[in-house]
Amino acid sequence: MAAVLVVAMLAVLLVARVGRLTADRARARTAADAAALAGALGGRPAAERLAADNGAALEQFTVVGDDTEVTVRTGDARATARARPRGSVATASPRTPDSPP
Protein backbone atom coordinates (compact mmCIF):
# COMPACT_ATOMS: atom_id res chain seq x y z
CA MET A 1 0.00 0.00 0.00
CA ALA A 2 2.81 2.43 0.87
CA ALA A 3 4.56 1.67 -2.43
CA VAL A 4 1.41 2.58 -4.39
CA LEU A 5 1.17 5.87 -2.49
CA VAL A 6 4.83 6.66 -3.23
CA VAL A 7 4.37 5.90 -6.94
CA ALA A 8 1.22 8.03 -7.06
CA MET A 9 3.02 10.96 -5.39
CA LEU A 10 5.93 10.68 -7.85
CA ALA A 11 3.49 10.67 -10.76
CA VAL A 12 1.80 13.80 -9.44
CA LEU A 13 5.16 15.54 -9.05
CA LEU A 14 6.19 14.55 -12.58
CA VAL A 15 2.94 15.83 -14.09
CA ALA A 16 3.31 19.11 -12.20
CA ARG A 17 6.90 19.52 -13.42
CA VAL A 18 5.97 18.81 -17.05
CA GLY A 19 3.05 21.23 -16.80
CA ARG A 20 5.28 23.98 -15.43
CA LEU A 21 7.87 23.44 -18.15
CA THR A 22 5.18 23.54 -20.84
CA ALA A 23 3.80 26.80 -19.44
CA ASP A 24 7.33 28.27 -19.20
CA ARG A 25 8.00 27.41 -22.85
CA ALA A 26 4.78 29.04 -24.03
CA ARG A 27 5.46 32.14 -21.91
CA ALA A 28 9.03 32.33 -23.25
CA ARG A 29 7.84 32.14 -26.88
CA THR A 30 5.30 34.90 -26.30
CA ALA A 31 7.86 37.08 -24.51
CA ALA A 32 10.45 36.51 -27.25
CA ASP A 33 8.00 37.47 -30.00
CA ALA A 34 6.94 40.62 -28.15
CA ALA A 35 10.52 41.59 -27.29
CA ALA A 36 11.73 41.09 -30.88
CA LEU A 37 8.96 43.25 -32.30
CA ALA A 38 9.51 45.94 -29.66
CA GLY A 39 13.27 45.80 -30.17
CA ALA A 40 12.92 46.18 -33.93
CA LEU A 41 11.10 49.46 -33.37
CA GLY A 42 12.48 50.77 -30.06
CA GLY A 43 15.86 49.13 -29.52
CA ARG A 44 17.13 47.20 -26.53
CA PRO A 45 15.27 49.21 -23.84
CA ALA A 46 11.93 48.44 -25.50
CA ALA A 47 12.85 44.76 -25.86
CA GLU A 48 13.84 44.52 -22.18
CA ARG A 49 10.59 46.21 -21.10
CA LEU A 50 8.37 43.92 -23.20
CA ALA A 51 10.25 40.81 -22.09
CA ALA A 52 9.79 41.84 -18.44
CA ASP A 53 6.12 42.70 -19.03
CA ASN A 54 5.68 39.11 -20.23
CA GLY A 55 7.46 37.58 -17.24
CA ALA A 56 10.82 36.94 -18.91
CA ALA A 57 14.39 38.21 -18.80
CA LEU A 58 16.17 39.39 -21.94
CA GLU A 59 19.35 37.34 -22.29
CA GLN A 60 20.54 38.39 -25.74
CA PHE A 61 19.79 41.29 -28.08
CA THR A 62 21.39 41.42 -31.51
CA VAL A 63 20.81 43.71 -34.48
CA VAL A 64 22.23 42.72 -37.86
CA GLY A 65 21.09 44.95 -40.69
CA ASP A 66 17.30 45.24 -40.39
CA ASP A 67 16.98 42.06 -38.31
CA THR A 68 16.57 42.21 -34.55
CA GLU A 69 17.03 38.90 -32.76
CA VAL A 70 16.35 38.36 -29.08
CA THR A 71 16.66 35.46 -26.66
CA VAL A 72 14.63 35.48 -23.47
CA ARG A 73 14.39 33.18 -20.46
CA THR A 74 11.49 32.49 -18.17
CA GLY A 75 11.71 29.77 -15.56
CA ASP A 76 13.60 26.88 -17.13
CA ALA A 77 12.70 27.77 -20.72
CA ARG A 78 14.43 29.91 -23.34
CA ALA A 79 13.09 31.17 -26.64
CA THR A 80 14.54 33.15 -29.54
CA ALA A 81 12.64 35.35 -31.99
CA ARG A 82 13.56 37.63 -34.88
CA ALA A 83 11.74 40.65 -36.31
CA ARG A 84 12.21 43.50 -38.79
CA PRO A 85 10.61 46.91 -38.68
CA ARG A 86 7.67 47.47 -41.00
CA GLY A 87 8.78 48.77 -44.38
CA SER A 88 11.86 46.56 -44.57
CA VAL A 89 12.21 43.92 -47.24
CA ALA A 90 10.64 41.38 -44.88
CA THR A 91 8.45 42.06 -41.86
CA ALA A 92 7.39 40.13 -38.79
CA SER A 93 3.74 40.51 -39.71
CA PRO A 94 2.14 37.46 -41.34
CA ARG A 95 1.34 37.58 -45.04
CA THR A 96 -1.64 36.02 -46.70
CA PRO A 97 -1.75 34.85 -50.32
CA ASP A 98 -3.92 37.92 -51.11
CA SER A 99 -1.48 40.44 -49.56
CA PRO A 100 0.32 42.73 -51.97
CA PRO A 101 4.10 42.32 -52.03
Image (cartoon, helix red, strand yellow):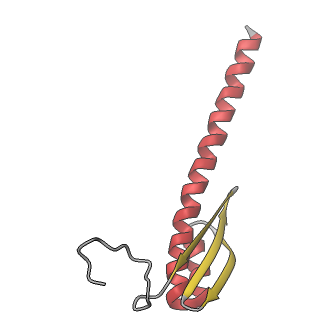
Using the image as rendered, state which of residue 88 and residue 78 is in the foreground: 88
Residue drawn at x 43%, y 82% as measured from the top left: 91
The residue sitting at the left extreme is 98
- From what the image shows, is residue 49 above or below residue 17? below
Measured as percent of width and height from the top left, residue 7 is found at 72, 20
The residue sitting at the top extreme is 1
Measured as percent of width and height from the top left, residue 43 is found at 58, 90
Measured as percent of width and height from the top left, residue 79 is found at 62, 64
- From what the image shows, is residue 14 above or below residue 48? above
Quadrant of residue 32 in the image? bottom right
Measured as percent of width and height from the top left, residue 15 is found at 62, 35
Quadrant of residue 16 in the image? top right
The C terminus, quarter of image: bottom left
Residue drawn at x 62%, y 67% as measured from the top left: 56
- From what the image shows, is residue 79 above or below residue 87? above
Question: How many numbered callouts?
Answer: 0
Using the image as rendered, state which of residue 18 and residue 63 is in the foreground: 63
Residue drawn at x 66%, y 81% as measured from the top left: 61
